[in-house]
Image (tube, rainbow, N blue to C red):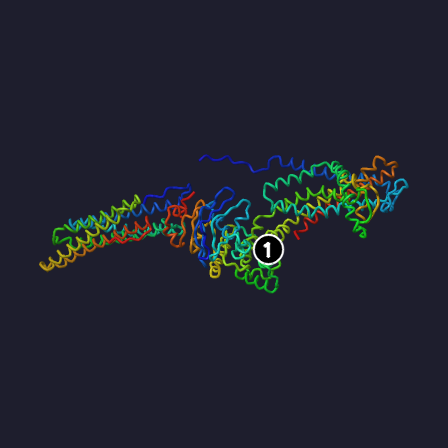
Amino acid sequence: MGDKTKSRGFVRRVALDRGLNKVKEMVLELSGIAKEAVRLSIEALKEKSREKIEKVYELEKRSDVLNMDIEDECLTLAALQQPVARDLRFIASMMRISNNYERICDLAQKIAYIAEKTIDKPLLKPLIDVPRMGKLVIEMLEINEESIRTGDTSMLEMELKARDDEIDLLYSQTYNELVGYMVRIPHRIDDAIDLLFVAKHLERMGDLVAKSAARLVYIEEGRRVWIK
Amino acid sequence: MPKRPRRKLTKRLNGDRGFFTLALCFALAVTALFTLVLYELARGSRLSVAEAGASLLSAEWNPGHGRFGQLPFIYGTLVSSTLALGLALPLSLLSAVFLVEMCPRGIADLLSSVIELIAAIPSVVIGLWGIFVLAPVVRDYIQPALSKLSFIPLFSGRTMGLSMLTAVLVLALMITPIITSLSKEAIASVPAELKDGLYALGATRLEVMKYVVIPYAKRGILAAAVLGYARAIGETMAVTMVIGNTPVISASLLSPAYTLAAVIANEFVEATSEVYVSALVASGLILFIMSALVSLAGRALARGGVG
Amino acid sequence: MKIEVKELSAWYGSHQVLRSVSMGVRENMITAIIGPSGCGKTTLLRCLNRMHELVDGARVEGEVLLDGENIYDPSVDPVEVRRRIGMVFQKPNPFPHMSIFDNVAIGLKLAGVRDKRKLREVVEDCLKKAALWDEVKDKLDQPGGRLSGGQQQRLCIARALATSPEVLLFDEPTSALDPISAMRIENLMLSLKREYTIVIVTHNIQQAARVSDYTAFLYRGVLVEYGETAVMFKTPRHKLTEEYLTGRFG
């Protein structure tokens, strides 16, 4: 987040600022990894690309490591720099956001598993809603990234709530549609269930990004919001 | 980064050595001077000691008849100085306390300047004032007032104005500035945090004076008193103009008296015989030793602790 | 509220140091006053026990209520105020020419207590409260100046306790001490707050965070923010407070 505080003084806490910026960059990197993982997992499912499945696995591993690193850096700053107020909120929130994003990568990995499992079978139905949901998740991640860079959280609640709601709607639609498929084509029930899981994972991802946005608001404004 | 040239650690010639030597020389010179003065005084007194012997300590000073008893002068110097200190010390102390602690800055500075001006007045001028102003006051006002108490030996007798009392008053006036100014410094140097500490416990101004300021400043005040005393002992001109210059030892304050400094100043020019001169040098030696003792006593007291 | 400060302004001569400060001090709690150098926090503290006016040219306007009574009312005796509100200073200042015993007892003696037994009782009690008794009980007649810095400060605390004050004011009590002595003093304050109301001025933000329940932030004589310490250190309301707490301050 941009440093909105006008520098009234001449003393800057160099070590702390450096550390905070490092955490910011690492979280942005993790956000990038999550976006990539979401995109590739859905494409892998659609295109039945083994290459893309492998890539997703790799990204998930990286996200694990990066999450640990972020936590480590935050703890070091807490121990050495005695952060208070915004700095403290920043460190606590970034640790949680990092966890959330790592979780998103886990969910993308799960989608990749399903892609791998069904790689030799034809798709049950053309994927329309699922990619749409994935696109929304990626959009939400990008809006968060922008907010992290600029420190502007004014539109966050609105923007993310709208998309999260849309994801929920799409999930409902997909759910009903798939139930229909299960009734009409019972021998492909497991495929339907797999697709349902994929939709569920994406719905969960939407929640995680929304939660993370709430944390960003907490950093900047000190108040707790719920974005559902 | 360019390497800095290494500098040698060996000793070098600098000004310290030379300064040390110079300062040492001056210190030794001063000590030598002191010893020289002492020696010369002793040498000069030898004649009178040889001729008059123990009678030098008698109470009779009658050079015409060969009597050179120093006692009247020793008495005169000690009594006049001690009484002057007794009078000046409380006054000076109170003034010092007032000026430092209670007086508004502007007025305090003004009063301090006035007090210091007194110290600047030449002693002969004070002596003149003593003769023409103070002596008549003693004669015309103080004496009649004291005559009611004349059954007390201290206040018995009559005077034309030139008396021990007048000298005591004059000396008190002369040593007050120095005692006041040094006491002020001692009092002002009491750390504010110490005073604050007692104020914070719920002390009045007087209590802070009593429990913190005076005990802490004791050493400095003592030093001031000693300095004032030494000044009084050595004061010549003003004293000799008002004390009456009569070598008697009397219990009465109204009686005239004589001090070591006064007798030297007065009678040196008319000292007819060598013994006479030697006796006066002996007076000088006694005065010298007295001053030295007062100084040493002062240092011992000052070092002896705050009490 | 044990103490209520109402529109308090203070001057040194023509230089105004406090501007209309209003705040409360809660009973049996520790209230910290923080702010950059020269913000007036020590002056504010000294106004609470009428020590500010001891300086030549000092002036005060406004009210300070102790249990509802204005201590600046003309009918109030400042000496009485200072008995009920004690103070511990930045540099430990025991009276060097008095024994340890006398140092603690002097407050009582000033209040008129002469009974030797009562004095001994109170001195022991206060030294125990100040966690100093065990270290000095065998040398009570030694001069007060010979203890270590931390011990001297505890002696000053015992001294302040002797007059049974209701409020204790601490002016940067540990800034001249080593970290371990400082920690002992902090622990002492935490235990004292059960019986006394405490106000501490400190330039050490972490100290304020560690010991205080409420914090007041002063900047250039103005009270910028006042609130629960836990809240202020997580979510300060004012930008200035935020800047000061996070150390991005000149």
Name the one closer to the observer, C32 or B138.
B138
Q: Residue furthest left?
A: A184
Visible in this render: residue A85?
Answer: yes
Q: Amino acid at mark 1?
A: Gly
Residue named by callout 1: C144
Q: Residue furthest right?
A: B65
Q: How many marks?
A: 1
Visible in this render: residue C186?
Answer: no
- The percent position of residue C30, horizontal first and vertical second, equals 45, 56
Residue B103 located left or right of residue B141:
left
Q: Is residue B132 above or below residue A165?
A: above
Residue at the image position 87 percent from the left and 39 percent from the top: B275
How crowded pointer 1 is (Cα within 10 Å; few <14, some 14-19, many 20+) is rated as many
Residue B20 located left or right of residue C19:
right
- The percent position of residue C76, horizontal first and vertical second, equals 53, 54
Residue C66 located left or right of residue B72:
left
Specify the subunit that label 1 lies on.
Answer: C
- The percent position of residue B247, horizontal first and vertical second, equals 84, 43
Residue at the image position 54 percent from the left and 62 percent from the top: C128
Residue B100 located left or right of residue B229:
left
Question: In the rendered image, which quarter contains the N terminus of chain B?
Answer: top left
- The percent position of residue B66, horizontal first and vertical second, equals 90, 41
Q: Quadrant of residue B264?
A: top right
Name the one closer to the observer, B150 or B51.
B150
The secondary element bearing badge 1 is classed as helix
